[in-house]
Amino acid sequence: MERLTIQQVAEATGLSVHTLRYYERIGLIHSIDRAHNTHRRYTEDDIWWIDFLTKLRATGMSIQQMQDYAELQREGDMTLPERVDMLREHGKQVEAHMAELRENLRIIRSKIEYYQAVVDEQTAETT
């Protein structure tokens, strides 16, 4: 299995090298192997985990909640019920946020329609 450098992982995940190092420092990314020259070498599993973390962060999970989840994940399968609960709760929050965004988009589209009607009316009057 090919191991990737931190720069390659940054390019693959869209995270900065700084963010990857930060995530490792705060315990979100655990025990990355290092080559003989002390450079980090990431596996496919590491990249999958980092990608999952980016999904959690992009959907509004706090760093603290991500750390709690990562700690549970490291503890193994005995923590599956807690992880399921965390993800269910987070999923509910994401769904509520999506509903709010959909309503905001509806209002924006309504305003666009109104403005477009005014513009069309003004254009018709000048021609």
Image: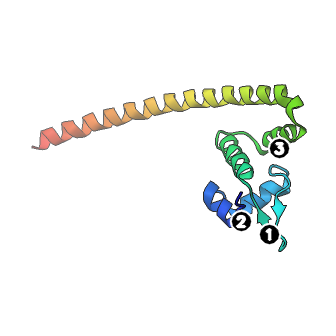
- Amino acid type at circle 2 is Thr
- Amino acid type at circle 1 is His
- List the residue tagged with mark 2: 5
Separation (CA) of disc 1 from disc 2: 7 Å
Using the rendered view, name the quadrant where residue 5 is placed: bottom right
- List the residue tagged with mark 1: 39
- Amino acid type at circle 3 is Gln
Using the image, tell me which numbered label, if any, was put on residue 67: 3
Q: Is residue 95 left or right of residue 78?
A: left
The percent coordinates of residue 76 (x first, y second) are 87, 36
Q: Is residue 81 above or below residue 55?
A: above
Q: Secondary structure at mark 3?
A: helix
Q: Assess whether mark 2 and mark 1 are in contact (beta carbons under 8 angstroms).
A: yes
Chain-order first, disc 3 or disc 1: 1
Label 1, residues with CA under 10 Å away: few <14, some 14-19, many ≥20: few
Q: Assess whether mark 1 and mark 3 are in contact (beta carbons under 8 angstroms).
A: no
